[in-house]
Amino acid sequence: MVTLPRPRPSVRKRAPVLGTGFRLYLVGESAGLVGTSVHLVALPTLAVLELDATAGQAALLASLAHLPTFLLALPAGGIVDRYAKRALLVGTDLAGAAVVTVVPVAALAGMLSMSVLYAVALVLGAVTVLHQAAAIAIVPQLVEPALLHRANARVGAAFGAADTAGTYLGTAVVAAIGAAKAFWLDVLSYLVSACCAARILEPGQPAAGEGRPRRRLAGEIWEGLAYTARTPLVRDLVVALTLTGVGVGVTGALFAYYLLTALEAGPTGLGVVMGVSGAGALAGALAAPRVVARFGPGPTLLAGFATCPMAGVPLLLARPGPVWLAVLAAAGGLQLAAAAVAGTTQRSVSWGTSVLSHHSSLEPVKGVRVALY
């Protein structure tokens, strides 16, 4: 009797995984974004409905929050290149928690004013610029190059879900306990983010002073600008994103104020519009890999940049009432879906260009890296 050998079970190849470090990063940053979304509902509600801010004061508050982006983006990129990114993530999270604590404490002491909100917005904006620069730069250290687009899509999806959840949570909390106390949730989110970042094992981090000579920060910024100027793809992305950012900033400066006053939406209406917009960002991030695979990165970026301003047109025509709120919510969802698809694609293209330049004996992007996002 001949015994035939048993066939060996087929070994299925496991798909490459993104790793524990990336998962910790994703959880921490998502938790931070939940708190930020609560903050974005509570802040205009506190300023407009409780401190009776005028249109000019609301615009100034929004402008101060975004001013550090224009002033500190290039230095932030240079700082991130010099120091461990995990330490920067933890430090900026703890600093953000301390800054946000000022709002509920000042309210409890009866000292809350627009001046306090101005100071908090400005300092928190500066902390956020540095945190975002480190958060963007650490991703390619946590995943393999072949998985970078997948990782960026996962980031976009998680952030879209966190944004939506945080917005609706913020709306409920503001209605239940008031806008000032809602900032405690933002403080908690910063602490959760810091704990997750502290557990990340940052691979490939050279010892201090090892690998390349220490150079002046101004020299690195100038090198980054020169790299951008001589690299057509990076240069065009920077110009496009800068112009888009200016447009979004101008609109966003008075968006919440307009909804709360002229359209009489109240904090609930504001939360609904912002929540649907966040859901659009989630849908866009999930669809990004398939969209790019079908149409390519160039047409995807072009369509995304074209859709964003067109989706803002309904705001020019809106009137008070639930129908227009629904229209604005749908337009916001479309706008952020397009932004998520374009943003995910742009991040992968930018990093791919940086890697190619590195393998071509050119230095990768330094001080301008954060400006691409």
Image: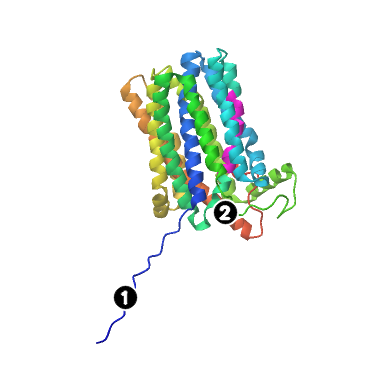
| Most distant residue in the bottom direction | 1
Q: Which residues are magenta?
A: 120-135
Q: Main secondary structure of the magenta part?
A: helix
Out of 263 and 278, give the one closest to the viewer: 278
Seen in the picture, residue 2 relative to 102 is either above or below; the reply is below
Question: Measured from the top left, where is residue 282 in percent x and y?
Answer: 40, 40
Can the viewer see residue 276 in this picture?
yes
Can the viewer see residue 373 in this picture?
no
Question: Measured from the top left, where is residue 296 in percent x and y?
Answer: 44, 53
Left or right of 156? Residue 241 is right
What crowding class fits label 1: few (fewer than 14 Cα within 10 Å), some (14-19), or many (20 or more)?
Answer: few
Seen in the picture, residue 146 relative to 125 is either above or below; the reply is below
Marks 2 and 1, how far apart in space? 47 Å
| Most distant residue in the front direction | 1
Q: Which mark is residue 7?
A: 1
State the residue at coordinates (57%, 52%): 141
Q: Quadrant of the N terminus?
A: bottom left
Residue type, label 1: Pro
- Closer to the chain start, of discs 2 and 1, is 1
Please tell me whether mark 2 sits on a helix, a strand or a loop: helix
Q: Which mark is residue 353?
A: 2
